[in-house]
Amino acid sequence: MEFSSKLLERAVNEMSQLPGIGKRTALRLVLFMLRQPKDQTIALSEALKTMRNEVKFCKSCHNISDIELCEICSNPNRKEEIICVVEDIKDVMAIENTSSFKGLYHVLGGKISPIDGIGPHDLNIDSLINKIKEGKVKELIFALSPTMEGDTTNFYIYRQIQDYKVFTSTIARGISVGDELEYADEITLGRSIVNRIPFENSIKN
Amino acid sequence: MEFSSKLLERAVNEMSQLPGIGKRTALRLVLFMLRQPKDQTIALSEALKTMRNEVKFCKSCHNISDIELCEICSNPNRKEEIICVVEDIKDVMAIENTSSFKGLYHVLGGKISPIDGIGPHDLNIDSLINKIKEGKVKELIFALSPTMEGDTTNFYIYRQIQDYKVFTSTIARGISVGDELEYADEITLGRSIVNRIPFENSIKN
């Protein structure tokens, strides 16, 4: 791609480093900015810079936060004895949207993945173990993705804490609400039968 | 979408104002930035701001440029008597990539489109007419998209300049190189027959 402007070229190159944005898309986005009022691009530029410079992570759960202890961790109405272990902050947002969980979170920041060079010490696992050791946690809910890496991470954490008196659970795997049985994959369907629940429980929600 | 950080929310909102980028994609991009080194986001932020503040448009052809008269217009090897009229700077880049054109360009900045409220005076048409009036231009090549708006714009300009001695042409419409005849739409195929060219011409390139 030949650019008639170095400034344009630099902007396109920087934009195209974002995942899923190629050179053509970057050019389209940058040309869009040039057609919009100047203020809009300045606002975008400032928002990104300020966020990157000033955003904090909660010192307890490692969720993204503007304050030292995030709003969830500092909320006295949440049950601090139940901790839901998630991979990243998108998962916190997804679970919060359901309004079905009143405990606290612990954001690992990824999953153990030897192929990608991510070991236990690259994740926020030590701080989780310390919370367990303090003895205040009664239940740990594993809510990682049901992949090889997710299962490995669950098992690693499980082994570290098995000497402590804490109940561990994983979120239910089964047929999605609204899904047709015939299209479900056999592993999911199989698990949903093995882990069947009392019918009275299923009509509660 | 519930955000645990106002800074994050602002960045996502600004990003999602770009065309084709919804809230979810914006969140994915912003979280990617948070995982990358700080320098990278600062560089992106600076590149966008600097571009928007400092980029210029060539005073002759209105192409994007870092200098008053762009590199194409100020190149003595380009034929200034042939002007190719295009919609926007992406078209200049596309034609330049072919290395098939040695004249100059004129970027209109859009097409006449009453539905979108774009009239002739919103486009760089006056400066094009002035170039014609000066008498140096021998050929004007219309290279707009073959849409209703493109044709309207071509015709509007054509009417303004028909009293001046200038040859006008449009880029050829026809079957794309490598395309199968049977899949071509009938208008394109019809035009390619009506506007057939001497066989000797077709084997020159």
Image (cartoon, coloured by chain):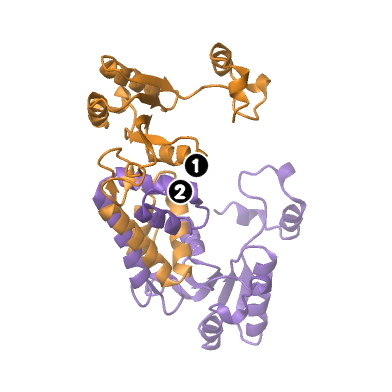
Chain colours: A orange, B purple
Three-letter code, disc 1: Asn
Task: Kindly indicate the quadrant of the structure image that contains residue A189.
Answer: top right
Q: CA distance from mark 1 to mark 2?
A: 7 Å
Q: Residue at x 47, y 47 (%)?
A: B25
- Of all chains, the one bearing label 2 is B
Q: Residues within 10 Å of mark 2 (few under 14, many from 20)?
A: few
For the question of whether residue B99 can be seen, the reply is no
**Rendered location of residue B180, percent (x, y):** 68, 42
Q: Nearer the viewer, residue B35 or B125?
A: B35
Q: Residue at x 47, y 69 (%)?
A: A36
View extreme (front): residue:
A77
Q: Residue at x 32, y 48 (%)?
A: A65
Label disc, if present, on residue A97 of the rendered structure: 1
Q: Is residue B135 above or below residue B36?
A: below
Q: Nearer the viewer, residue A63 or A81?
A: A81
Q: Circle 2 sits on which residue?
A: B2
**Rendered location of residue A15, percent (x, y):** 38, 53
For the question of whether residue A169 can be seen, the reply is yes
Q: Is residue A195 above or below residue B122?
A: above
Label 1 close to label 2 by CB (< 8 Å): yes
Task: Kindly indicate the quadrant of the structure image that contains residue B63.
Answer: bottom left
Three-letter code, disc 2: Glu
Which secondary structure, mark 2? loop
Q: Residue at x 26, y 54 (%)?
A: A54
Q: Residues within 10 Å of mark 1 (few under 14, many from 20)?
A: few
